[in-house]
């Protein structure tokens, strides 16, 4: 299928062409037609499937069909995080660059006055996080009375983050006659309830069943003691020549510490979490996207919805507390048809939670072994060995070890999966075509 067959106007097709997109992703092929028919849509798709364009393209087409730019916004997109709001806003600008419509993005953590100024100048599409949007509504600096299309992006995450009341308040400020689109990676009882409240006879589109993970993502677990995690991480990054990795940790403090340790060990890293200013978060994201950082260490909330195109590796350094977050996290890799590797560290305490995750995703995560990894016996606190340098246990250093080799997933004695599931990694050595990419010299 081509984008042209989806009845998008030449201005939009030209923008897609300049991005190098030749054909729609499955969620785009499924969602664009009903959105163009002005139906309400419930879309089951996670970040990485091309879901933003799945709503942005037909919405721009519908705007163009109505013509003329407007002072008050006609389209509202609500997103759970600031970073996602910024990305969605950029996407609207990009896909709509040949059209006369203007997108404004508003989120918290930055001064409100410049936003008020910009809103006064008018926009057609408004992308917002709930809290800041409500601030503007309370101050009377935004008028939502002309919203004809409302999009709730990453609805499941919105609910996880406790935004349900805010969403309901926003909905009350909208005209009752409008088209609604809701995107969610997972379906829970709460999501279904919200669907019932928000959507009118929705067309349901899905790129995969329920809570399953993206097909192209290879998953691998490593059984590891807690105090060995950072050593194994540094080992994998270096020995497997990972170009870049997004690492999920549980706490803000843990994120800062790991970023420092990795940087010290020669892996340029930065932490991204809720205590960092918006500016610092965006800066880290930019540096990562530009290839100046090799590892981005993130807490759950901070990493939500980040558009990190072509990311080849994700590591669950700490397991998520909510099983659904596993699906979201590993969705950072294997984006839009590319393949990726999601590695999860499992300590003895994590086994029950891993089983919960496996139940949710409907598959077991195979265990791998990093062949040349020798656990560090003694942790040094101050002035110790540099990070990632393992203490020799008499195992000879391999000669001429091939760079970028994938970890062996041969079953270890503690592995729980049945034999015959042995995994070959040679097929996707340079995940996303990035494994070999050269980092920019600083
Ligand atoms: P999203 O799921 O919206 O976060 O999109 C994932 C990534 O895929 C983004 O970087 C998009 O720019 C990219 N993308 C979206 N649509 C396409 C397409 N039709 N072909 C190739 N890449 C795409």
Image: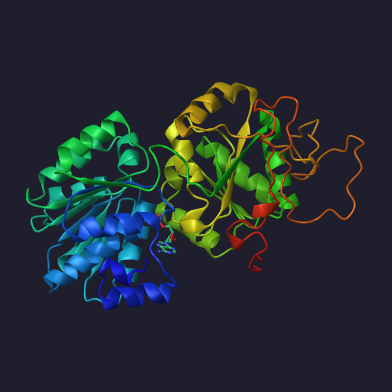
Please tell me which residue lies in front, 109 or 250. Answer: 250
Q: Quadrant of residue 68?
A: bottom left
Viewer-side residue, 208 vs 387: 208
The vertical placement of 388 against 192, above or below, is below
Report whether 221 appears left or right of 388.
Answer: left
Give ligand 1's quarter of the image.
Answer: bottom left
The quarter of the image holding the N terminus is bottom left
Residue 217 place in picture, x, y as percent: 54, 47
- Residue 20 visible from this viewpoint: yes
In the figure, residue 53 lies in which quadrant? bottom left
Q: x, y (%) of residue 121?
A: 17, 70
- Residue 77, compared with residue 376, is above or below; it is below
Residue at position x 60%, y 22% in the image: 349
Q: Is 295 or 367 nearer to us in this picture?
A: 367
**Which residue: 84% across, 38% down?**
391
Quadrant housing the C terminus: bottom right
Which residue sits at x=22%, y=57%?
35
Measured as percent of width and height from the top left, residue 356 is found at 49, 25
Q: Nearer the viewer, residue 118 or 363?
A: 363
Q: Measuring from the top left, give residue 343's x and y in whole percent.
A: 61, 41
């Amino acid at each position: 299928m081509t984008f042209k067959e989806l009845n998008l106007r030449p201005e939009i097709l030209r923008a897609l062409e300049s991005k190098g997109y030749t054909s729609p992703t499955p969620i785009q092929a499924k969602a664009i037609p009903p959105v163009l028919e002005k139906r309400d849509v419930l879309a089951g798709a996670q970040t990485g499937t091309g879901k933003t364009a799945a709503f942005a393209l037909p919405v721009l087409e519908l705007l163009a069909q109505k013509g003329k730019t407007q002072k008050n916004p006609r389209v509202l997109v609500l997103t759970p995080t600031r970073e996602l709001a910024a990305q969605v806003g950029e996407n609207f600008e990009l896909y709509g660059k040949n059209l006369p419509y203007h997108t404004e993005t508003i989120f918290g953590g930055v001064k409100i006055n410049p936003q008020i100024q910009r809103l006064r100048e008018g926009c057609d599409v408004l992308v917002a996080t709930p809290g800041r949007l409500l601030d503007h509504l309370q101050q009377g600096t935004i008028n939502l009375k002309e919203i004809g299309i409302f999009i709730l992006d990453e609805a499941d995450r919105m609910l996880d983050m406790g935004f349900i009341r805010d969403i309901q308040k926003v909905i009350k400020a909208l005209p009752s006659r409008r088209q609604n689109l809701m995107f969610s990676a997972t379906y829970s009882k709460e999501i279904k309830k919200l669907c019932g409240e928000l959507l009118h006879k929705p067309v349901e589109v899905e790129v995969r069943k329920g809570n399953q993970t993206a097909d192209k993502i290879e998953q691998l677990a490593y059984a590891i003691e807690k105090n060995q995690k950072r050593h194994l991480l540094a080992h994998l990054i270096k020995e497997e020549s990972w170009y870049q990795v997004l690492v999920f940790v549980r706490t803000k403090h843990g994120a800062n510490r790991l970023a420092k340790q990795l940087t010290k060990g020669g892996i340029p890293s930065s932490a991204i979490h809720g205590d960092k200013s918006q500016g610092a978060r965006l800066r880290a994201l930019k540096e990562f996207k530009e290839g100046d950082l090799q590892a981005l260490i993130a807490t759950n909330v901070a990493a939500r919805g980040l558009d990190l195109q072509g990311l080849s590796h994700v590591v669950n350094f700490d397991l998520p507390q909510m099983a659904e977050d596993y699906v979201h996290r590993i969705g950072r890799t294997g984006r839009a048809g590319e393949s990726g590797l999601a590695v999860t560290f499992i300590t003895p305490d994590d086994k029950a939670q891993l089983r919960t995750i496996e139940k949710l995703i409907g598959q077991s995560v195979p265990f791998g072994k990093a062949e040349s990894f020798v656990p560090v016996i003694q942790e040094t606190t101050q002035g110790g060995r540099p990070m990632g340098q393992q203490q020799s246990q008499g195992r000879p250093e391999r000669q001429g070890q091939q760079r970028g080799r994938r970890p062996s997933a041969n079953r270890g004695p503690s592995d729980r999966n049945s034999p015959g599931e042995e995994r070959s990694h040679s097929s996707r050595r340079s995940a996303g075509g990035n494994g070999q990419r050269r980092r920019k010299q600083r």
